[in-house]
Amino acid sequence: MKFLLKAINRFNDMKIRKKLMLIYIIVVLIPILVVGFYLTEGMRSMVIEKSIDEACTNNDRIQYRLNEIIKIANDVSDRMYFDEKLNKIVTTQYTSAADVVKVYNEYPIFDEFLRYYKEIASIRFYVENHTMLDNSQFTKVTEDTRKSYWYTRALANDGRIEWMYKTDEITGTDYLSLIRLVKDINRNRIGVLVININEDRLRALIKDEPFESIIAINEGKVVMSQNNKLRGTSIDFLSLEELKSRKEHYIVEKNYNGEESSIIMNSFSPEKASANCFQIVMIMPIANVTSKTTQISIRGISIMLVNLVLSIILITIFSKWFSERIILLRKEMHKVVTGEFNIEESIEGKDEIGELYEDLNKMMQSIKQLIHEVYEEKIQKEQLKNRQREAQFKMLASQINPHFLYNTLETIRMKAFVKGDHETAKIVKMLGKIMRRNLEVGDKPISLDSEVELVKNYLEIQRMRFGEKINYTINVDCDISNYFILPLLLQPIVENAFVHGLENKQGSGNIDLNIRAEKDNFIITVKDDGLGISPEKLEYLNKCLEDFTIGGKKSIGISNVNQRIKLYYGEEYGIKIRSRINEGTEVILILPKSKEVQGYAQSIDS
């Protein structure tokens, strides 16, 4: 314990540069050497395991594709087994060769199977009917045929399928063959069917495999191999009993052709031929698999040694540079302690030392600017209030449109002249509401209900003026009672839709006002199907919404409304405009839900 405390104290007394060198040796240098040799051996084992896994996967793929070929042959044999026409051809006693040839020409099933299934090389049907003629498909059974092993096995199996590796009597070629006795409906023998599998299709199963691959049958007789010399021979290292007892791959380590190899084997019994056993074998030489790993390991160790030498040089340079920066930081902090605030603006690097020095510099700047911040904040508040007063002035100046009042009064006169007093009273009442609102509007929020009522009165007056030319709808999809907004936010938007969108449009037009709630906001949409806005003017309007200074002193419409919204509610709220020429315009207002009735000017002052 005393030794440990002594070592800690001694370490604490060391200069930072020496500490870094010692830590590097203990934490980096020694572990890298140990881990390097450990990883080299681990990588070798991992490569071998990965190669075995890949071989197992390929083994399964070969088995699956071989099974597909076997299923095709099984299907063909079943179809021929139950073919009544084939039964009749084979059992008929013919009186002339012409009759036989005619029957052959009228039975194209063999050729069709060969044409449709490229997996099949040939089909032979061995018959006892000696009135038939031999050809590439029908063959009369001879004494040699009766004595052959495959023929006797077919008779013994009594209609069951069996797979063999045999020589075709006609071509002399060795094939993997399906052999089956065919009977009629009365269970009488009519012949033996032999379906030979195309060896090119079998070769295609294994030709692209990275390891030597073998397909064997029954007692290990090689049906197909990448090494053609093995075809027809028996594999002596197969343990069939061991293979049959395992559901997964059987992997053994053996010496094959003088090389240490991992042999991956798998066996399966094909469908409808449980007496047969197919084996798929892959031979993976260990030396070939690990050759690249060994080369990489040698190169890796060499690179590691070079890197260690370079790292020692670099850590020496770095520790010197690091120590100098620490010394510089200590000197500058000492200046601050003595009351000198004029320190160097920055230090090299943006690491923790650089960030610490930057924080020190910012702290000095904060102290200097502490007094100025109070005055700057007051100045900003005054500027905000001035902009607000200017917006309010523009709003009040634009509330009464003489042209609108003139046309409204003229409409009242015409209506009073043509129609009765009820309609005149109605339009005068609505006009009175609008004029009273414009004259009494202040700086406090008003209920959203009353703002919608104002818009409705305005639209109803315009409809009385223009008749069926103007149609409107007001849809409120949420509860707006007890909610408040700034005054005269909606009416200028609706007026713009009418004046700029519908007034000069040929035919009738529509204005739709929709209000819906979305989380904590109201989404208010004013849409018309009028003349629309050209892309150039729409771009200019959007710029005015983003920058209040572009519109100038005359900007009292949508830009004015957008400015008031942002000043009062915040930058995340405001107006969006969408429009297409001759299709219409859509103006979207995003406002927060608010139930507080507080002074507009008072909120700015606070």
Image (spheres, rainbow, N blue to C red):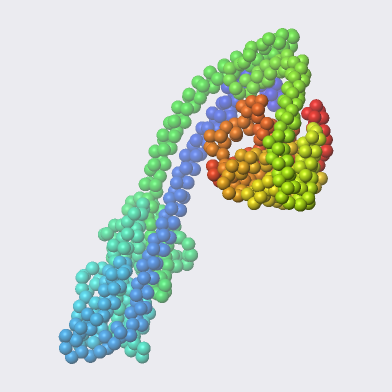
Q: Quadrant of residue 134?
A: bottom left
Place of residue 350 in the rendered image (x, y in percent of width and height, measured from the top left): 60, 22
The residue most toward the left is 97
Place of residue 567 in the rendered image (x, y in percent of width and height, measured from the top left): 72, 31
Total tally of numbered discs in the picture? 0
Place of residue 282 in the rendered image (x, y in percent of width and height, measured from the top left): 38, 57
Placement of 392 over or under 136, stated as above or below: above
Placement of 303 over or under 122, stated as above or below: above
Q: Is residue 123 visible?
A: no
| Residue depicted at x 32% and y 56% | 207
| Residue depicted at x 37% and y 78% | 78
Q: Quadrant of residue 566?
A: top right
> Is residue 48 rendered to the left or right of residue 538?
left
Place of residue 602 in the rendered image (x, y in percent of width and height, measured from the top left): 82, 30
Q: Quadrant of the N terminus?
A: top right
Placement of 229 over or under 5, stated as above or below: below
From the viewer's side, name the closer residue of 376 and 522. 522
From the viewer's side, name the closer residue of 198 and 416. 416
Q: Is residue 169 visible?
A: yes
From the viewer's side, name the closer residue of 358 and 437. 437
| Residue depicted at x 71% and y 15% | 364
Q: Quadrant of the C terminus?
A: top right
> Is residue 314 rendered to the left or right of residue 9?
left
| Residue depicted at x 79% and y 32% | 443
